[in-house]
Image (tube, grey):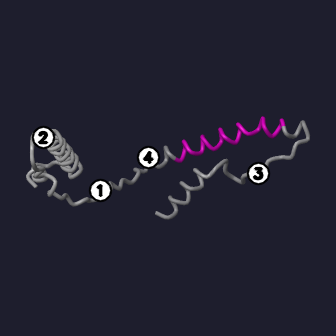
Amino acid sequence: MQHLKSGLVPNTVRRDLAELKAALTRAMKWGYSAINPASQVKVNVETYHRVRFLADNERTDLLSALNARDEKQSVGREPGKVFRLKRGYAQKPKLGEFSDYLLPWFCWLRKRG
């Protein structure tokens, strides 16, 4: 508990405890100690999730980058379309307005809030 009170993150405390337990277990195997006092210590596992929202300028930059990526992928498919058309091969189905899932997924997330 003293480590937590000193301002360390719980994951740091868990990692330190795991290293201590491993060292004491190894000391027991090598015959330097008869017991491992740290084996009885339990640490509560907490999930730590940091939620961060994009600022307006970051959201605009991301949308611009996704649009540019989508356009580049669409243009990149044109030579394949021409190749198949010249040789009489079946055309690939049109994917719709977008080149893949990423841009529509981002737009859907934006609308959800």
The answer to which of 78 and 48 lies nearer the viewer is: 48
- Left/right of residue 38 with respect to residue 54 in the rendered view: left
On-image quarter of the N terminus: bottom left
Identify the mark nearer the N-term, 3 or 2. Answer: 2
Q: Is mark 3 on a helix, strand or loop?
A: loop
Give residue 94's mark. 3
Of the residues tagged 1 and 3, which is closer to the observer? 1
Identify the mark nearer the N-term, 4 or 1. Answer: 1
Give residue 48's mark. 1
The answer to which of 83 and 13 lies nearer the viewer is: 13
Marks 1 and 2 close (CB-CB < 8 Å): no
Hey, which quadrant is residue 53 in on the image?
bottom left
Q: What residue type is labelled 4?
A: Asn
In this rendering, the answer to whether 108 lies above or below 60 is below
- Marks 4/1: CA distance? 27 Å
The residue that label 4 is drawn on is: 57
Decide whether residue 80 is among the magenta residues: yes
Q: How crowded is mark 3: few (under 14 residues within 10 Å), some or many (20 or more)?
A: few
Marks 4 and 1 close (CB-CB < 8 Å): no
Hey, which quadrant is residue 96 in on the image?
bottom right
Q: Residue 41, position in %: x, y?
A: 15, 57
The answer to which of 102 and 88 lies nearer the viewer is: 88
Q: Residue 90, position in %: x, y?
A: 86, 46
The residue that label 2 is drawn on is: 31
Of the residues tagged 3 and 2, which is closer to the observer? 2
